[in-house]
């Protein structure tokens, strides 16, 4: 059973990642083919690309290393970086209701609030590496796991004619991605993903050196600054596209 679960899990991860990479390619080379037209804006796709890099780094590099070495600093440092890069995407570039229907749009909003809440609760509790393992391989991984099926099923109702012919399309899509959500939790909880390892209980907690703290804190500060600058540039570009002139006045001493 674990072999089958691992194959399906890995395939869904690869599928989701490939969709993200393809979207970046389309934004630069074939913007008319984008499912989310907001990414035709070069600043928007820059923010999305940064988010993909951060998510991939947390999921496949920082998170697994932090689990294996029991490092709370690196674990939460990677997760904070993920949330920093995700905020402008969720706030400015979320077109799930328009692309997939209001039902899935509401589901994505609910899921985001739920996942942020779970992370806050787990962070506030005593360190439990099994909980950290679940957060990484369930909630972080799900950012890729549902992307492929959701995009594929959206083609069943991506035009007014198809929606009229298949009014059940959106419900089917939602049913599939929520099933993936639940089954992923069960697979991870029951340790069915062969290469997703729970930390060795006998391993001592990693004690970070001063330079590690500086790298994690400094890296997140830089990421927050870059994200803020890109968000400001994006909003300014949207205002400029709509003919709004920004007036900057010097403050009096």
Image: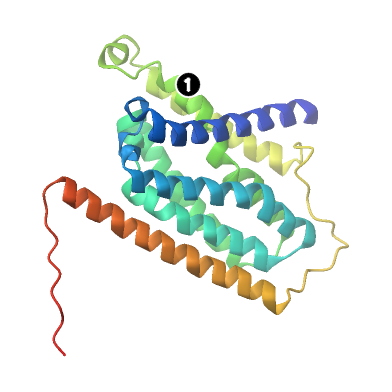
Write the residue at 45% across / 48% down.
Answer: 112
Q: In the rendered image, which quarter contains the N terminus?
A: top right
Give percent across and percent down for residue 214. Answer: 62, 75
Q: From this viewpoint, is residue 76 visible? A: yes
Write the residue at 49% across / 49% down.
Answer: 51
Quick one: which residue is furthest to the top in this view?
165
Rendered view: 25 above or below 41:
above
Write the residue at 51% across / 51% down.
Answer: 115
Give percent across and percent down for residue 175. Answer: 48, 26
User: Which of the pair 94/41 is nearer the observer?
Assistant: 41
User: Which of the pair 100/57 is nearer the observer?
Assistant: 57
Q: Is residue 170 left or right of residue 129?
A: left
Rendered view: 158 above or below 92:
above
Q: In the rendered image, which quarter contains the C terminus?
A: bottom left
Rendered view: 246 above or below 91:
below
Q: Image quarter for residue 159?
A: top left
């Amino acid at each position: 059973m674990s072999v089958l679960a691992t194959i399906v899990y890995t395939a869904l991860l690869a599928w989701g990642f490939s969709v993200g990479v393809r979207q970046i390619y389309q934004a630069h080379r074939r913007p008319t083919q984008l499912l989310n037209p907001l990414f035709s804006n070069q600043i928007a796709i820059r923010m999305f690309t940064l988010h993909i890099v951060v998510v991939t780094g947390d999921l496949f590099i920082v998170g697994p290393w932090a689990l294996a070495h029991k490092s709370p600093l690196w674990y939460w440092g990677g997760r904070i970086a993920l949330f920093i890069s995700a905020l402008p995407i969720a706030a400015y570039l979320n077109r799930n209701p328009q692309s997939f229907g209001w039902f899935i749009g509401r589901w994505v909003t609910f899921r985001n609030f739920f996942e942020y809440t779970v992370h806050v609760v787990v962070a506030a509790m005593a360190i439990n590496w099994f909980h950290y393992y679940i957060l990484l391989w369930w909630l972080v991984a799900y950012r890729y796991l549902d992307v492929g099926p959701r995009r594929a099923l959206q083609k069943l109702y991506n035009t007014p004619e198809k929606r009229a012919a298949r009014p059940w399309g959106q419900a089917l899509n939602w049913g599939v991605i929520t099933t993936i959500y639940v089954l992923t939790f069960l697979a991870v909880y029951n340790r069915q993903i062969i290469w997703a390892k729970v930390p060795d209980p006998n391993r001592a907690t990693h004690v970070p050196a001063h330079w590690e703290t500086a790298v994690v804190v400094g890296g997140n500060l830089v990421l927050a600054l870059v994200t803020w600058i890109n968000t400001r540039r994006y909003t300014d570009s949207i205002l400029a596209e709509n003919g709004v002139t920004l007036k900057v006045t010097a403050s009096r001493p």
